[in-house]
Amino acid sequence: MSIPRLHGSVLPVAPAAAVSELLVLLPSLGTGSELWAGAAAELRRSCPSLRILRIDLPGHGGSPAAREPFTVGDLATAALRVVDEVGGGSFHLAGVSLGAAVALELALGVPDRVRTLAMFCSGARIGEPAAWRARAEQVRGSGTASLVTGSAGRWFAPGFLETDATGAGARLLGSLLDVNDASYASCCDALAEFDRTPDLARLAVPTLVVSGEHDPVTPPESMRGLADAVPGARYAELEGASHLAVAEQPAVAAALLSELIEQPAGNGEHTTTFARGMTVRREVLGNTHVDAAIAGTTDATAAFQDFLTRYAWGDVWSRPGLSRRDRSIATLAVLVADGHLHELQMHLRAAQRNGLTRDEIAEVLMHVALYAGLPAANAAFGIAKDVFAEPAPDDTRNEGAPNG
Ligand SMILES: O=C(O)CC1=CCC(=O)O1
């Protein structure tokens, strides 16, 4: 075994940005930096202070072919060398499939340097050793061209390639032909040996685990199991995506990464309005709702979700001038008076999280009847009856909390 040489490239940062943190992105077997192109472009816009380093696997993209066999641990050592060449220090880390396995090795091996870990469509072990040995054999005999049809079926959800206006999917499949056959086969051999399952419980890095709904390689059940095994890990499933979810839904992948990277530091202070917004949104609307909103985000709605998090939650709901309880009273009154009843259920639950009792909520609706009319209040009482038939929201940890 030996440590292969890997190539990395740092994306240019905006001239005025005060660069503060490094994000390292690792690709999957058979793909190069192109895999992260869409998500990296989103991240450069939403987190301009990030320096983004993309590293290629051996014989993929700009990395030279490997001359000797290697393990996933060797790939981690090689990736760390690239990080050190661009300045070292601590870094955020995200990978897809084999790239995420390499990232997991790093998070276990140098936890003091890895600030956050995002594992997209991967595992502490991936697939079966015999299948990897067979794939290695096939590529050594027939080259990566023999993999294109099978890879298309595993990488992308049904219909993605036909409707992908960006051409990212077709480019990724095209670049599979350029991957060095022997290096691809060595990656398969490394995956056959890889199993970090027993080590997950000692992973001490804030971790995000993301699956694609249709992924046949690392299906949602296995990804959920991975998240359950890592202390404190957050899990998200991308609806309508498959194994290369980061290329299929780059804006959603970037939003998940922003949230992970910008989470409060140890001192509890938020680094950005987005991070504060995400925290307040989760505290008021609950994790179940926010996780569903993130998972249901599409490229068409990502910018709106981002706007909502920053302006509604990171700004107005975070202002100190009114308590969250008072803001809930105002919100309920306006929603009912203006007939936005489709949002009422969510805000009736939020009002309880913000410390309003059910009697107080009924009093608010009564007051609204006076000024906005009986029909509006009557409809609202109908919705409240259903919400009050549920147990009180269990995540009422911010009862009576001040803002922010
Ligand atoms: O099987 C594939 O092509 C997908 C894949 C498995 C490991 C990896 O990195 O990508």
Image (tube, grey):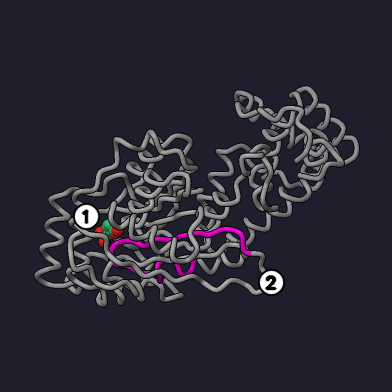
Badge 2 marks a residue whose secondary structure is: loop
Instruction: Give the answer, above or below, for where 354 lies relative to 175.
Output: above
Q: Quadrant of the C terminus?
A: top right
Front position in the image: 297 or 229: 229
Magenta stretch: give its range. Answer: 19-39
Name which residue lies at 15% across and 67% down. Answer: 139
Q: Quadrant of ligand 1?
A: bottom left
Q: Quadrant of the N terminus?
A: bottom left
Relative side of 301 to 135, left or right? right
Disc marking residue 30:
none
Q: Quadrant of residue 264?
A: top right
Kindly report the distance in space between the C-alpha atoms of the residues bearing marks 2 and 1: 42 Å
Q: Inspect this view and state whether residue 34 appears.
A: yes
- What is the x, y in percent for residue 214? 35, 53
- Residue most extreme to the right: 371
Front position in the image: 28 or 196: 196
Name which residue lies at 81% across and 45% down. Answer: 319
Name which residue lies at 53% across and 69% down. Answer: 41
Give, as a three-letter code, the residue at label 1.
Ala
In the picture of the structure, the residue carrying the numbered disc 1 is 190
In the picture of the structure, the residue carrying the numbered disc 2 is 16
Q: Inspect this view and state whether residue 152 appears.
A: no
